[in-house]
């Protein structure tokens, strides 16, 4: 394009980004600390806020390891075995990305709620899932389910099974092979997958709001605390909570951006044995849309 | 025996979290036959919410396809200090929790807007929120294709006397069109189910700013699960159809690497 168009396009692109993304996100930092750091600090150290932080921490602590174990397992199954119905497993793993999180919440209620499929069975054993912490964990684990698989699977497919087979013929046990050969080669993509899963679980709202009942101090995660604070005109609390989550989001971006500049662009994997995602662009895209599915919050 | 434990656990986990809940959703939506489903979907408030959701998503997907093209263009063909930062900023809407996104937009374009631009409780507010969350899809689907585009063709065309608008319309846009369309499809599918970012800024006024996902939410609050399931089935079907279309598009134009 001729240089005549350079400046208009530059201004258009950067202007749109500034007014749609940069200024709004910047403004919550301003609003949170508008009345001083102490005010913001006290707003996120109220009992309800601390409980929300604690519950969010618990949810991450349970949902992320479950999703990670599942993700690595499914990636291994899909890359190492040919079996009828593999495509179905593949498709179902991606499904949460295509489904609105509110819908995920409704669907969970229909199975685990009082009138749901397992309602009577659970009630007879005194287990409450919906409007309780297990439901929150399930909703979060569901929406974040695909990320580890999507990160790890392409790497496993790329590295193939030569080394594993060699180890097997030399008499290595499956667990040793996984620990000494498979794990080191997927380490990096696994780290990305876990990062994305954690970010997704931390930020989950739609699914959690439906299954939790949002009871302050009981079933309120940080995102619910933010929206609840906002509705109850606890504006500083809402902004302070938002700042915590925004900082985590920026940290995630910084991790991806740092690796981008370090590894250079374009090449998705540096070498088969040491896979490293290309720029954050293709990385996030590979997770969210290479699997033809938008990440719906 | 041992070799079935791993796959068994994985399938159980997937069933408990995804397969059974979605099966329950479909079953519930048609629990009393097609007429209950149709009743739920054709209720005036449901029709209004679905119409608003589809139209707003379509408008945003189309607008962001253009905005995404311009941004991708600047990121690929332009050089300026701080480009890497701008490139990273594109992914911010992916990383930011949607409630936080809604709050940020409300701060700048709500009742206390420093620009005196208040779009809270209006349909324009919904467009803002959807544009925010779908931006990465629109940029990231075009960007790699543009980067791979053979510039020699463009140079050959201009050396043969093609005007720059001729090059744009005859060479660049035709090669980018499939990727733009795929990006718009992803943006649309995402926008249709969006909840967190919209809910704060839209105000959820029935027949005015209530989108389908908030209608589902309010149905669930009043325990009308059959209706909620019916609308959910519509949303899921729309998203799946669009994604299926993108899959076909991808195979047809061989843009799997890019998108």
Image (cartoon, grey):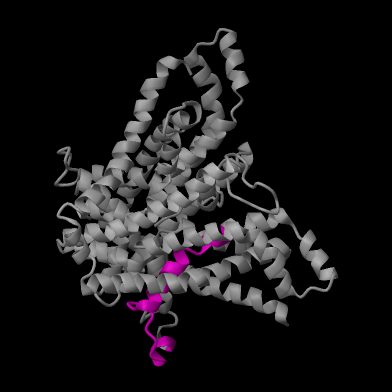
Task: Please tell me in which quadrant of the rendered image residue A56 appears.
Answer: bottom left
Q: Assign the magenta stretch its main secondary structure.
A: helix
**B107 left or right of A276 in image:** left
Between A190 and B125, the residue placed more toward the observer is A190
Identify which residue is drawn at 61% across, 64% down. Answer: A89
Between B256 and A12, the residue placed more toward the observer is A12
**A5 left or right of A179 in image:** left
Q: Is residue B38 magenta?
A: no
Q: Quadrant of the C terminus of chain B?
A: top right
Q: Quadrant of the N terminus of chain B?
A: bottom right
Identify which residue is drawn at 20% across, 62% down. Answer: A237
Please, is residue B257 above or below residue A200 in the view? above
Identify which residue is drawn at 65% across, 55% down. Answer: A155
Q: Residue A118 in the image: x percent, y percent?
A: 44, 82
Please, is residue A218 above or below residue B76 in the view? below
Q: Is residue A148 magenta?
A: yes
Q: Residue A190 in the image: x percent, y percent?
A: 57, 61
* Magenta segment boundaries in residue numbering: A121-150
């Amino acid at each position: 394009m001729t240089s005549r168009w350079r400046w208009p396009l530059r201004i258009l692109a950067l202007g749109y980004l500034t007014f749609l993304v940069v200024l709004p996100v910047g403004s919550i930092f301003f609003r949170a600390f508008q009345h001083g750091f102490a005010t913001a600090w006290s707003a996120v150290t109220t009992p309800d806020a601390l409980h929300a932080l604690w519950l969010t921490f618990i949810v991450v602590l349970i949902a992320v390891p479950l999703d990670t174990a599942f993700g690595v397992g499914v990636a291994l199954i899909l890359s190492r075995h040919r079996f009828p119905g593999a495509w179905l497993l593949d498709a179902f793993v991606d499904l949460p990305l295509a489904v609105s999180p509110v819908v995920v919440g409704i669907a969970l209620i229909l199975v685990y709620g009082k009138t749901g499929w397992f309602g009577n069975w659970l009630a007879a054993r005194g287990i409450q899932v919906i409007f309780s912490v297990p439901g929150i964990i399930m909703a979060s684990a569901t929406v974040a389910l695909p990320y580890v698989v999507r990160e790890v699977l392409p790497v496993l497919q790329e590295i193939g099974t030569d080394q594993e087979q060699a180890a097997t013929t030399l008499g290595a046990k499956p667990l040793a092979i996984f620990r000494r050969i498979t794990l080191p080669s997927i380490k990096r993509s696994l780290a990305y997958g876990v990062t994305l899963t954690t970010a997704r679980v931390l930020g989950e709202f739609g699914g959690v709001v439906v299954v939790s009942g949002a009871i302050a101090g009981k079933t309120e995660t940080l995102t619910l605390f933010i929206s609840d604070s906002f509705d109850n005109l606890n504006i500083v609390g809402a902004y302070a909570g938002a700042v915590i989550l925004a900082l985590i989001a920026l940290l995630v971006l910084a991790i991806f951006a740092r690796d981008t500049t370090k590894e250079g662009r374009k090449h998705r994997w540096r070498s088969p044995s040491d896979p490293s995602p290309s720029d954050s662009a293709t990385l996030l895209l590979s997770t969210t849309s290479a699997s033809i599915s938008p990440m719906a919050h | 025996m041992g070799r079935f434990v791993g796959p068994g656990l994985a399938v159980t986990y997937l069933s408990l979290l995804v397969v059974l809940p979605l099966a329950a959703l479909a079953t519930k939506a048609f629990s009393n036959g097609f007429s209950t489903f149709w009743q739920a979907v054709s209720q005036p408030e449901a029709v209004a919410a679905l119409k608003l959701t589809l139209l707003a998503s379509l408008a945003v997907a189309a607008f962001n396809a253009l905005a995404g093209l311009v941004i991708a263009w600047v990121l690929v063909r332009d050089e300026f200090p701080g480009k890497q930062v701008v490139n990273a900023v594109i992914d911010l809407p992916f990383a930011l929790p949607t409630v936080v996104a809604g709050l940020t937009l409300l701060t700048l374009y709500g009742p206390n807007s420093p620009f005196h631009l208040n779009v809270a409780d209006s349909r324009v507010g919904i467009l803002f929120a959807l544009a925010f969350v779908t931006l990465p899809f629109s940029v990231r689907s075009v960007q790699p294709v543009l980067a791979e585009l053979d510039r020699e063709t463009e140079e050959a065309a201009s050396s043969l006397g093609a005007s720059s608008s001729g090059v744009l319309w005859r060479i660049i846009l035709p090669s980018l069109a499939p990727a733009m369309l795929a990006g718009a499809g992803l943006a649309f599918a995402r926008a249709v189910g969006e909840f967190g970012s919209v809910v704060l800024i839209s105000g959820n006024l029935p027949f005015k700013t209530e989108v389908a996902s908030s209608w589902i939410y309010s149905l669930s609050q009043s325990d009308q699960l059959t209706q909620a399931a019916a609308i959910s089935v519509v949303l899921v079907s729309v998203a799946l159809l669009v994604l299926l279309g993108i899959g076909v598009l991808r195979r047809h134009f061989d843009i799997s690497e890019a998108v």
